[in-house]
Amino acid sequence: MAGQPRGAGPLWALGGAALGVCLTGVAGQLVEPSTAPPKPKPPPLTKETVVFWDMRLWHVVGIFSLFVLSIIITLCCVFNCRVPRTRKEIEARYLQRKAAKMYTDKLETVPPLNELTEIPGETGQSEAGKDSVDTVAIKVEEDEKNEAKKKKGEK
């Protein structure tokens, strides 16, 4: 006892008790190995695997692909997506639009049918003051001028 310092005995006892409490807690956390066989692996996913509602994987993929394709086609039709064209097609489309514009411009100059032909049974009560026939463009311009005069009159 001469080699041990004074009061060291109870300190060792306290350390040993603390170590025993810790080892008891750790031993409670250990998992005992089970004797049950390991869980079987799920079967591999193939195209013939039934996914849901008795449909195979390739059925689901096909239906989903058709759904996505129909959405793309619908959006392209609604928003009129441009498809790349050749220079020849672009020039032909330009000439077609130009011809359509010339046709509509000439069509505006044609007077209404009732002014070109005589209506049977009509007495000669035509407007004597009107020598020229108004086109749609002239009528629109006159309406705009009348609206502008009304706005100036209101102010």
Image: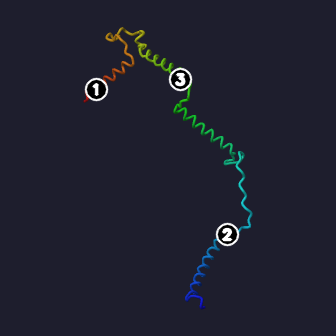
Compared across the picture, whether 26 is left or right of 95 comes to right
**Residue at the limit of the structure toward the bottom, as seen here:** 2
Q: Which residue is mark 3?
A: 90
Write down the quadrant of residue 69 in the picture: top right
Amino acid type, residue under disc 3 in the picture? Ile
State whether residue 140 is above or below residue 5.
above
Q: Which mark is residue 25?
A: none
* 67 relative to 122, above or below: below
Tell me, for residue 31, which label it has, or none: 2
Circle nearer the N terminus (3, 1): 3
Secondary element type, mark 2: loop
> Depth check: 112 or 71 in front?
71
Quarter that holds the C terminus = top left
Instruction: Tell me the amino acid under the disc marked 2.
Output: Val
Mark 1 or mark 2, which is nearer the start of the sequence? 2
- Could you tell me residue 48's position as x and y percent? 72, 46
Where is residue 125 shown, x and y percent of the image? 34, 10
144 to 129, vertically: above or below: below
> Between marks 3 and 1, how big is the CA–CA gap?
46 Å
